[in-house]
Image: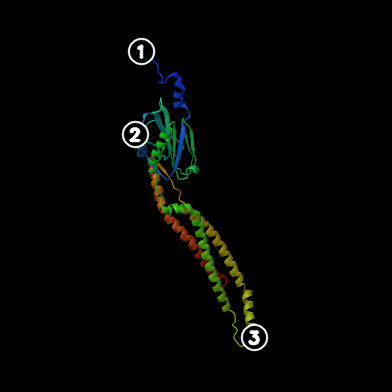
């Protein structure tokens, strides 16, 4: 009402007194919520956010009497700082001057929507969080509606969290399906080999260590047989007719072998080599497991440093296969190398 209508300028709520409670409840009451989580890895850039904003705005305005009350974008960086932007234009034009890596992005839309069967417009809120899950820090967002705290263990490979606060179930489900389908386009495909290596990294390391030990045992067994044969050659052979002198000479040869301690030195060397091989296999097996496990990362590409970090990660991920193959080869070579050392030590100490 204005002064021309006879009175002080006044803002009038568009509802009769008996419906005032319903009107306030639609604006300030506790809404229903739909929440969803999409795991990474993913990549989201400024253009992707713009496309998402246009998609949501077009869908809502084309089917409902709606007004966008507020849009906010909060960007979190790797130095535990963040910046809050209050419009899409500000977000698209904002450029961080510091050499920081953007690790998370929280988007929020607040709409007033009048549904066909409702007498008054009601508040609907859409919130989407992109977390890179870099495994080093926690991500905090404090918004007017609720407190959102994301920990590394909750976002191991990054993820996208969707929350819709609505007063109309059909509208909320429709918007959730629309946004989820768009967010799935941001997810990056993971190859079968990488999924297998990550899932069974422990088994790969254990199998490699076990194979090295098996090689060591087989070659050690072969050397033991050869050593026994060579030792037997040093004994006097009994040829018929067997005489007491021949038996005495053979007993003397056996006594000399026992007295020389050659079998004692052999057993000691075999034990030392086998224990060293076990320790080395365990250590190298753990290294193989670490090389096989390459954590998947997501990226919020809102700064030049973020793009550089993504490129370095992709390059390291490609080279990880060569490292894995090298460590596996080195572990298997341990089984052969330990027997080579055993053979050389045997020749030196045991003659």
Can you see residue 43? Answer: yes
Q: Which residue is mark 1?
A: 5
Q: Compared with residue 57, is residue 268 higher up or lower down, i.e. above or below?
A: below
Where residue 249 appears, x then y in whole percent?
Answer: 63, 82
CA separation in Å, label 1 and label 3: 142 Å
SS for tag 2?
helix
In this rendered view, identify the residue nearer to me: 344 or 139: 139
Q: Is residue 65 above or below residue 155?
A: above
Which residue, as the protein is rendered here, is positioned at the far front?
Answer: 117
Pick the front one: 214 or 98: 214
Considering the image in quadrants, where does the C terminus appear?
Answer: bottom right
Label 1 element class: helix
For the residue carrying disc 1, how many other residues have a C-alpha within 10 Å: few (<14), some (14-19), or many (20+)? few
Residue at numbered disc 2: 58
Q: Measure the alpha-carbon separation of dots 2 and 3.
A: 110 Å
Q: Nearer the viewer, mark 2 or mark 3?
A: 2
Q: Residue furthest bottom?
A: 241
Whichever of labels 1 and 3 marks the residue nearer the N terminus, that label is 1
Q: Position of residue 166 (x, y in %)?
A: 44, 32
Of residue 43 and residue 108, the one placed in the foreground of this image is: 108
**Pointer 3: what residue?**
245
Q: Residue 226 in the image: x percent, y percent?
A: 54, 73
Pinpoint residue 270: horizontal percent, then vertical percent: 57, 67
In which quadrant will I find the N terminus?
top left
Reading the chain from its start, which is encountered first: label 2 or label 3? 2
């Amino acid at each position: 009402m204005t002064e021309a209508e006879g009175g002080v300028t006044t803002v009038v709520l568009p509802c009769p007194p008996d419906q005032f409670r319903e009107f306030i409840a639609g604006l300030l009451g506790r809404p229903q919520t739909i929440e969803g989580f999409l795991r990474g890895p993913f990549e989201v850039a400024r253009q992707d956010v713009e496309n998402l904003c246009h998609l949501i705005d077009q869908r809502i305005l084309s089917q409902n009497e709606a007004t966008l009350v507020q849009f906010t974008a909060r960007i979190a960086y790797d130095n535990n700082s963040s910046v809050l932007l209050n419009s899409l234009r500000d977000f698209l034009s904002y450029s961080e001057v510091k050499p920081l890596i953007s690790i998370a992005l929280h988007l929020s839309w607040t709409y007033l929507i009048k549904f066909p069967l409702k007498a008054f417009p009601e508040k609907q809120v859409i919130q989407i969080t992109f977390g890179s899950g870099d495994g080093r820090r926690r991500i905090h967002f404090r918004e007017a509606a609720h407190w959102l705290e994301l920990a590394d263990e909750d976002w191991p490979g990054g993820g996208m969290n969707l929350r819709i606060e609505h007063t109309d179930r059909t509208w909320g489900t429709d918007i959730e399906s629309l946004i989820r389908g768009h967010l799935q386009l941001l997810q990056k495909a993971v190859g079968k080999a990488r999924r297998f290596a990550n899932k069974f990294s422990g088994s790969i390391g254990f199998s490699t260590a076990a194979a090295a030990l098996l090689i060591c045992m087989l070659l050690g067994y072969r050397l033991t047989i050869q050593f026994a044969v060579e030792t037997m050659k040093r004994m006097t052979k009994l040829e018929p007719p067997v005489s007491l002198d021949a038996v005495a000479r053979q007993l003397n040869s056996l006594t000399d072998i026992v007295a020389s301690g050659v079998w004692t030195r052999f057993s000691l060397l075999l034990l030392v080599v086998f224990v060293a091989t076990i320790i080395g296999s365990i250590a190298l097996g753990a290294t193989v497991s670490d090389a096989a496990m390459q954590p998947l990362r997501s990226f919020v590409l809102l700064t030049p440093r973020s793009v550089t970090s993504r490129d370095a990660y992709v390059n390291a991920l490609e080279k990880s296969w060569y490292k894995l193959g090298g460590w596996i080869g080195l572990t298997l070579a341990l089984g052969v190398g330990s027997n080579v050392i055993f053979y050389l030590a045997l020749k030196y100490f045991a003659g």
